[in-house]
Image (cartoon, rainbow, N blue to C red):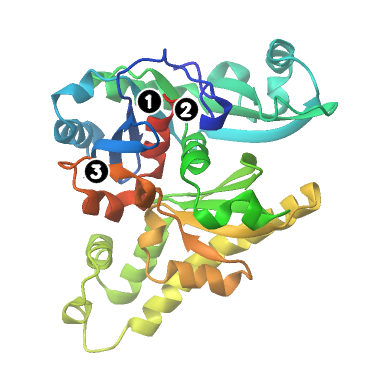
Amino acid sequence: MHYILESYFNFIKRTVLSQGDDNVLGLDMGATICSAVELRRGQSSFEVVRWATEVVDSTDEKISLNKLLDKMGPSARTKPCIVAVGGKGTLIRHIDMPRMTVADLRKAFAIEADKYFPFPKETVYSDCFILDPRAKDKRMAVLVAAIKKDVVDLRLKVLKECGITPEALTVSSSAVANAFATFAPPTCTPADLGAKAVAVIDIGETFTNLMIISDGVPRFTRDIFIGATDVWRRMANVTGLSVAEVKTLYLKATTGLADLLPAKDYSEDMRRSVDAVLGNVVAEIKLSFDYFNTEKNMPVGRICLIGEGVFVPDVEAAFMAHFDIPSIAWNPADMLAVAADANRDGFVSEGRRMTIALGLALSHYD
């Protein structure tokens, strides 16, 4: 639990777990959806052994977690498990420091941690990580992260009550970075991007995480507290339906919306609703792109969209309209083999909302 960033990237070849034959369970407890993935590694690729998703019960998330674990089978509660925390109560900073050893960095960080976080030191778990350990420059890129103790303690309490003792707990964006390092879209390789960076935008239910990656290393991370729920809420206001009804209809891609609405055609009003919410997200992302380009002298050349918000109507088209940058809905599940009894079609369908769980399951492997 204390190793917040110990397995930050798959390609750095570090792990919080002793290497062994047992598969690892990646467990993502989101605000409205919880998901789990178990992987095994073959000679040249990974295979999904089993996976599951479960809608979070708004009254007691333990109910949902127990249902999820039951779907994963009896061994789920005994396997090594890695869990992520994201959103409010977590914070990541990318800083530049003089080149030093990891040991010296940790000593310096222990003294200067208050400079990087707006939380009192005694209220957080924090850690630091050298992002470019092999660079020869006199300066180095360092990632520092903090998670509020009450957030961690509440997560651990729920897990314990469900029979889970996690091997490690990390920030959710680290799991996304892990998945990207292993399953990046073919058009996002350094050869394709040249001197440009790629932005991975995880549109979650309650917040959007922006991560800018160059040369395989995250260089910028930011949370924007606007998510897919804001879209569903705006659409519900327009149609007179409940948030649950609007979301269910669109996530199931049904065509029966008109049957539930008054005679008026709401399609244009709903499109404007989507544009209004996504426009606010886009405005914040543009500010971050401008800042990153100014600081690093590197434009963003590709946008990869993941998360619950990818299921929002026309989200790709909205991003394409606002940015003169190719935007794609990235689904790492497309690149994975799935065990014969694990329903590949279902896994691919759910893949964009399971990136965090997938990245967590990858943490075990070197």
> In which quadrant of the rendered image does the N terminus lie?
top left
Report the amino acid beneath label 2: Thr
User: Residue tagged by mark 3?
Assistant: 53
Q: Under tag 3, what secondary structure?
A: strand
Amino acid marked by disc 3: Thr
Q: Is residue 213 left or right of residue 4?
A: right
- How far separated are the C-alphas under marks 3 and 2? 20 Å
**Point 33% across, 32% down: residue:** 27
Q: For mark 1, does the 10 Å Cα neighbourhood hold few (<14), some (14 to 19), or many (20 or more) residues?
A: many
| Residue 237 falls left or right of residue 199 | left
Q: Mark 2 sits on what residue? A: 170
Looking at marks 2 and 1 on the same chain, the residue that comes earlier in the sequence is marked by: 1
The percent coordinates of residue 135 (x first, y second) are 76, 28
Reading the chain from its start, which is encountered first: label 3 or label 2? 3
Residue at image x 20%, y 37%?
64
Please name the residue that numbered disc 1 is placed on.
82
Is 336 situated above or below 149? Answer: below
Q: Amino acid at mark 1?
A: Ile
Look at the picture and state if 152 lies above or below 318.
above
